[in-house]
């Protein structure tokens, strides 16, 4: 299998990562999150597909925090009623790929499934307590992908990194691929995800004595600065 990352490109990325390393602050551990925060994190992973800003607003905007509170959503008994409501929230947030009709909104369908799944588990904290009991990061990734709708390679890793449930992985997204293109690495999300992830950890993170999760956060959060200044 060919290597995506040359020694020179890895060196360039190490130089960038070294510059922004102190900015790579980890999220708080999963057991210090509230049920509401965990639910919004799960919902946000659906919202950010296509555009990251709606996920940020779900976590921090008081208006939308109230609109998607567990207490409020529990009042919507039927799946159809909940799907229609969440579609309206997604439209208000400017979430991409939701369509005009709530009946055909795959993101709203996934959000309903995930809400019901978390409630059936006894709440988000109990759900993630089960995930935390998985012995390996790979098992935790699989648990999220198996248990939650609209959760792929990136979404599962991003959630686990943010909750400090994974270190040796990366949530490769458009911003990070943009940084890779900046140093001449020709890859895309359609390439072999795990190989790109492994090379970045082995050739960039490990020599700098940082985790894959730290490398992920610093590349993601400093994306604009890196593209502008290197």
Image (cartoon, rainbow, N blue to C red):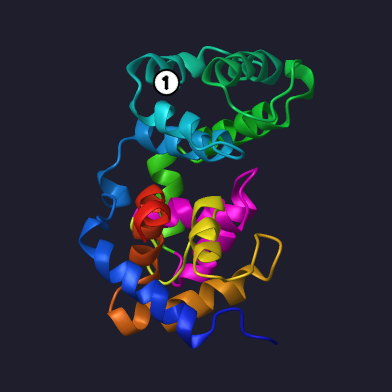
Q: Residue at x 31, y 36 (%)?
A: 34
For label 1, the crowd category at 10 Å Cα-Cα, with few meaning under 14, some 14 to 19 and many 20 or more, is some
Residue 67 placement, left or right of 16: right
**Residue closest to the far right:** 104
State yes or no: residue 5 in magenta: no
Between 230 and 92, the one nearer to me in the picture:
230
Query: Residue 216: x percent and y percent?
Result: 41, 61
Please name the residue that numbered disc 1 is placed on.
Answer: 69
* Boundaries of the magenta span: 134-163
Query: Residue 199: x percent and y percent?
Result: 52, 79
Residue 56 placement, left or right of 118: left
74 versus 41 height, above or below: above
105 versus 18 height, above or below: above
118 versus 175 height, above or below: above
- The image quadrant of residue 50 is top right
Between 84 and 4, the one nearer to me in the picture:
4
The kind of secondary structure element at disc 1 is loop
Q: Residue at x 42, y 18 (%)?
A: 64
């Amino acid at each position: 299998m060919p290597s995506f990352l040359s020694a020179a490109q890895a060196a360039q990325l190490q130089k960038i990562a070294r510059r922004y390393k102190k900015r790579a602050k980890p999220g708080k551990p999963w057991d210090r999150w509230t049920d509401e925060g965990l639910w919004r994190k799960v919902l946000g992973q659906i919202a950010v597909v296509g555009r990251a800003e709606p996920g940020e607003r779900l976590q921090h905007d008081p208006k939308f925090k109230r609109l998607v509170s567990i207490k409020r959503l529990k009042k919507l008994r039927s799946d159809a009623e909940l799907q229609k409501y969440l579609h309206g929230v997604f439209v208000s947030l400017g979430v991409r790929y939701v369509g005009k009709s709530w009946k055909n909104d795959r993101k709203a369908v996934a959000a309903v499934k995930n809400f019901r799944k978390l409630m059936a588990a006894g709440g988000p904290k109990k759900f993630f307590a089960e995930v935390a009991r998985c012995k390996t990061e790979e098992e935790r990734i699989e648990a999220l992908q198996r248990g939650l709708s609209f959760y792929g390679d990136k979404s599962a890793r991003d959630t686990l990194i943010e909750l400090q449930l994974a270190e040796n992985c990366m949530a490769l997204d458009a911003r990070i691929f943009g940084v890779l293109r900046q140093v001449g690495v020709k890859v895309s999300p359609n390439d072999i995800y795990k190989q790109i992830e492994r090379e970045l950890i082995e050739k960039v993170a490990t020599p700098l004595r940082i985790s894959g999760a730290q490398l992920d956060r610093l590349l993601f959060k400093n994306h604009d600065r890196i593209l502008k200044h290197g």
